[in-house]
Amino acid sequence: MLPKNKNITIAVLPFHITSHDERVTQLFLGFVEDLITHFSKFIGLSVISSYSTHRIKEIANPDEILKLGADFLIYGSVRYHKDNLRISIQLVKTEDHSLVFGNQYNETIDSLLETQDDIIQQIVAVLEEKINYNLLSHSYKKSSVELAAYENYLMGMHTLQKGTGDHDIKARAYFNAALKIDPNYSLAYTGLSLSYFNFWSCLIWNRWDESMQGAHKYALKAIGLDPNDYTALGVLGRTYVYLGEYEKAEHYLRKSLRMNSNDCSHLLRVAFSLMYLGFADDALKWYLKALDLNPFHNDHYYAHGSIYHLAIGDFKSSIALSKKTNFNSWTDFPAYIAAAYLQLKEYDDVWRCWKVYLSQFQQAVYSGQKPMEEEALAWLVMVNPFKGFTYLTPLVEFIRTEKQLHEQTDDSPVESTINNTFQSKGDYWDMCYQGHCITLKHAKGFKDIHKLLNHPKQEFHCLDLMNAAVDERSSAKTMDQKAKLAYQQRIKDLQEEIDEAEDLNQIEKLAPLKAEYDAILAHLSQSLGLSGKTRTSGSTIEKARSAVTWRIRSSIKKIAKIHPSLGNHLSNAIKTGSFCSYTPEVDVDWTL
């Protein structure tokens, strides 16, 4: 009997299929993957990744079997004849090759899913006798899906594993086909979420927002149908990290690990997210477990390990692991290694790695909207949403400082501070104040602020900023006072909700909130009287005043969240209302 609380490690080997029917072959490739997934959900079982088991063709190969490190092996064979399946399953103890469990199942293809559940439950019951406590199966539930939907799901997952953007799109067709058959098939939504997650995490930058929203939306749909879907929980945790909702992110990530801590691909996804949240030790722990579960892992694993060792401050291990993998593991990987070299003050290697990063950035990301190195620095910070300290920060500061020094001419004085800037760079704004620089996505209020900064102490009517026109001679109908107050309260509530959603980057909430806000303003601009009474009012001017004031204040609030000194300066120096102006107490020289 194994020691108390010692996990049993099992390996499910590829089945021997004696059939030339392509459908049967595809079904049982997926069947084995599903066995691995379902076994991994049981507390007390560790399951070797299929990446390591698929290469083992014969149980009689002792060297390869030994490398797996499994306590038990599960393998089987399938014969298909005249619509009948004969499935043989054996559970063997690795130590002495003794047969622990064996059974034979005579089924049809249509009853395959029920047979899969029987196999899982029977083997788990046998394994329970080998340990001193019960296996918990709270995250396992029996399949209740039509076979045709299941087949489409399997084909979608098989297509996803090919790992290209084109295959991600093709996989979605299979998942959508599964949902047409069964609209409540949670795993199909999980598959869709993964297809968008792959696009997003594999840095297809021209579809960044679309991919993140897709990953988030379909993960929510999946857990709405199955709250214990560990893959969807992990994806959702990752999207909440990028949305800045760190408590939600940790909740979903931790729950996903409770549901399944034995799927190596899942462990790597969660480990990266936990690192962003500041749990570097946890990230390293789950990475090491993923290594154990996938002993024949590819070199890509070393890139993960390199970054997790950097996060805990083990710079030499980080660099050593980086030498075992390709620098093009992902676009910003060389920048992480540059950060490790910087901590060791090995500056030649810092610049060598930085040049590799710039080259990869230019090929994969660069938009051409601003100088490449400047854009590469801003992008590096944006796509690595660390909650707290990261060793990327000293690297970014080092590169910026050295870049400024190199740009000085031999006889020009070295400036002690960075110029104060507020500049539009396409979809982003670069802002520097008192030596601290930030980059934010475009917002309408930034354009208003830019105009005010460009004309200090000059007043602009709200209509000038709004680019609106009004005929002061026209009259409009307005509602009674009670209705007007109700609308004003709803506008205030909406403004607060939009502010909060923008602060937290809750993309899925913004569109409906803004639509309602615009609809109410459009209605108010017509001044429709709910009580039948009418009176004249300058509704267009009022609408412009309210909208401009709110969007400027909202934008200042957004700036203040990550650059408090600039936010405080703008809040004190900018006056809003019917007339807006920028009047600082001390003149500031802006580069606009």
Image (cartoon, grey):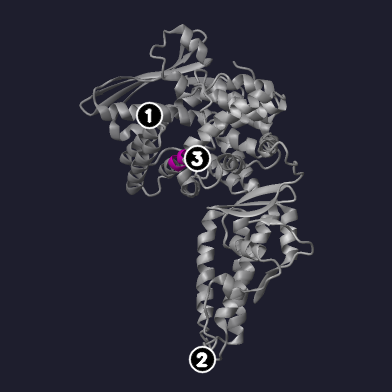
**Location of residue 167 (image quadrant):** top left
Residue corresponding to mark 3: 365
Mark 2 crowdedness (10 Å alpha carbons): few <14, some 14-19, many ≥20: few
Asked if residue 134 is positioned above or below residue 403 in the image, the reply reads above
Q: Secondary structure at mark 1?
A: helix
Image check: 253 left or right of 296? right
- Which quarter of the image is occupied by the C terminus? bottom right
Asked if residue 95 is positioned above or below residue 278 in the image, the reply reads above
Query: CB of mark 3 within 8 Å of CB of mark 1?
Result: no
In front: mark 2 or mark 3? 3
Segment tinted magenta in the rendering: 195-199
Q: Secondary structure at mark 3?
A: loop
Gap in Å between the C-alphas at discs 2 and 3? Answer: 58 Å
> What residue appears at the point 72 percent right and 55 percent down from the top-left corner?
566
- Which quarter of the image is occupied by the N terminus? top right
Residue corresponding to mark 2: 532
> What residue appears at the point 51 percent right and 91 percent down from the top-left corner?
532
State which tag comes first along the sequence, 1 or 2.
Answer: 1
Main SS, magenta region, reads helix
**Location of residue 84 (image quadrant):** top left
Q: Which amino acid type is shown beneath numbered disc 2?
A: Gly
In front: mark 1 or mark 2? 2
Would residue 219 be visible to someone looking at this image? no
Gap in Å between the C-alphas at discs 3 and 1? Answer: 39 Å
Q: Which amino acid type is shown beneath numbered disc 1?
A: Phe
Residue corresponding to mark 1: 31
Gap in Å between the C-alphas at discs 1 and 2? Answer: 69 Å
Q: Which amino acid type is shown beneath numbered disc 3?
A: Val
Residue closer to the observer: 210 or 393 = 393
State which tag comes first along the sequence, 3 or 1.
Answer: 1
Image check: 518 left or right of 254? left
